[in-house]
Image (cartoon, rainbow, N blue to C red):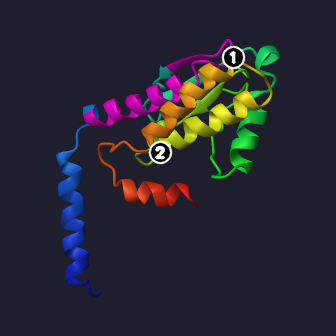
Amino acid sequence: MKVAKEQIVGMVAAVDWFLSQSDEEFEAEFRRRADRIAAALKDIPTLKSEIFIPPIANSVPHLLIRYDQQRVKISPKEVAKQMHAGTPSIELNPATGSTEGSAGIPNDANKIVVGVWMLEPGEDVIVARRLREVLRRRRRGDRKKGKVIDEALSACTQTNYPFSDSSRIASRSAH
């Protein structure tokens, strides 16, 4: 088997990068992503969010979102369906809207689960914007307050995130 020198250099660079990272840095970044998504949803009536680290399997932060479906007028399963069907297509954790427990995630049907650890840097802002759009679509609310949050989300896309290449993020979000 032949291996090109470029492949060896690439592998060495990848190993060097991996060894320079720490679990604490990753967890802090994942929590920042979850916090940005939660902050974008703060004006949705009755919405409560929490960062949850499942005790089983992927012990990384997940964002759990709960709300009164009678007030917001959409179920978590419908949110997942619309997020998947939208542009860009976003896949929420399969435990969203499920009464079956999964890897330690609570088993109530009134929850949206966002796995922030799989997002590329900057994609949290895209997820936040789409969740806001889907959750606000069915209701009329305080447009002024919503506009302020929408403007803040737009400003976030201009931010340079740690671990990120903002030109790559922009090109990914256009697909």
Quote the CA–CA distance across marks 1 and 2.
Answer: 24 Å
Q: Is residue 160 visible?
A: yes
The numbered mark at residue 80 is: none
**Closer to the N terminus: mark 1 or mark 2?**
1
The numbered mark at residue 67 is: 1
> Which residues lie in the magenta part?
25-50
Q: Main secondary structure of the magenta part?
A: helix
- Quadrant of res 96: top right
User: With respect to residue 49, does 33 lie above or below?
Assistant: below
- Quadrant of res 74: top right
Check disc 1 and report its element: helix, strand or loop.
loop
| x 69%, y 43%: residue | 83
Which numbered disc, 1 or 2, marks the residue closer to the eye?
A: 1
The numbered mark at residue 118 is: 2
- Which one is nearer the viewer's eye here, 148 or 125? 148
Q: Is residue 85 left or right of residue 174?
A: right
For disc 1, the neighbor class at 10 Å (few under 14, some 14 to 19, many from 20) is many
Query: Is residue 39 on the magenta stretch?
Result: yes
Query: Is residue 60 on the magenta stretch?
Result: no
Q: Is residue 93 left or right of residue 52?
A: right
| x 24%, y 84%: residue | 4
Residue lying at the far bottom in this picture: please name it: 2
- Which one is nearer the viewer's eye here, 128 or 151? 151
| x 56%, y 59%: residue | 174
User: With respect to residue 115, does 13 lie above or below?
Assistant: below
- Quadrant of res 24: top left
